[in-house]
Image (spheres, helix red, strand yellow):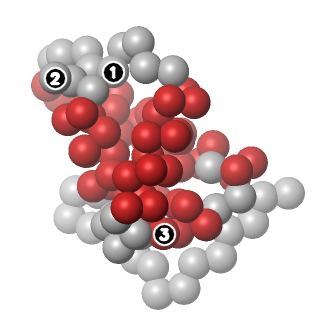
Amino acid sequence: MLSLVYSNLTFSESSIRGIGLSKCKTFNNTPIEEKVIYMSWTAGFISSHNILKKKLHNKNIKYNLSQSWLESYCFNNPESSFKNAVEYFLKEFTK
């Protein structure tokens, strides 16, 4: 059973909703089997980005590479929001 506990976490900002507002350190402290929630949010964020930009980004990036890259970014930027990590991921892999 999956259970997440967040304190003082707002799940809504002007244009961002949900888990993307959590800090990178929360992502890195999440057990591996529960990171699928973050990666699902990431897939939705990238999908909406593709639709809004009318361009396909990150089309040949594997799930494990995506997760490893985000873990590394978040390790180095623990106070960054998870949304910012995904935005940097998009920039890195759309060059």
Residue 25 - label: 3
Task: Name the image quarter holding residue 55.
Answer: top left
Which residue does the image show at 47% across and 33% down from the upper left?
Answer: 66
Tell me the CA gap for discs 3 and 1. Answer: 24 Å
Tell me the CA gap for discs 3 and 2. Answer: 27 Å
Seen in the picture, residue 32 relative to 25 is either above or below; the reply is above
Q: Name the residue under label 2.
A: 95
Q: Which image quarter holds the N terminus?
A: bottom right
Disc 3 marks which amino acid? Lys
Which residue does the image show at 33% across and 52% down from the upper left?
Answer: 85
Secondary structure of the residue carrying numbered label 2: loop
Left or right? Give the position of 67 relative to 59: right
Disc 1 marks which amino acid? Asn
Comparing 80 with 10, the one in front is 80
Disc 2 marks which amino acid? Lys
Q: How crowded is mark 1: few (under 14 residues within 10 Å), some or many (20 or more)?
A: some
For marks 3 and 1 on the same chain, the one whose residue lies earlier in the sequence: 3
Comparing 82 with 9, the one in front is 82
Tell me the CA gap for discs 1 and 2. Answer: 10 Å
In contact (CB < 8 Å): disc 3 and disc 1: no
Q: Name the residue under label 1.
A: 58
Secondary structure of the residue carrying numbered label 3: helix
Residue 12 appears in the rendering = no
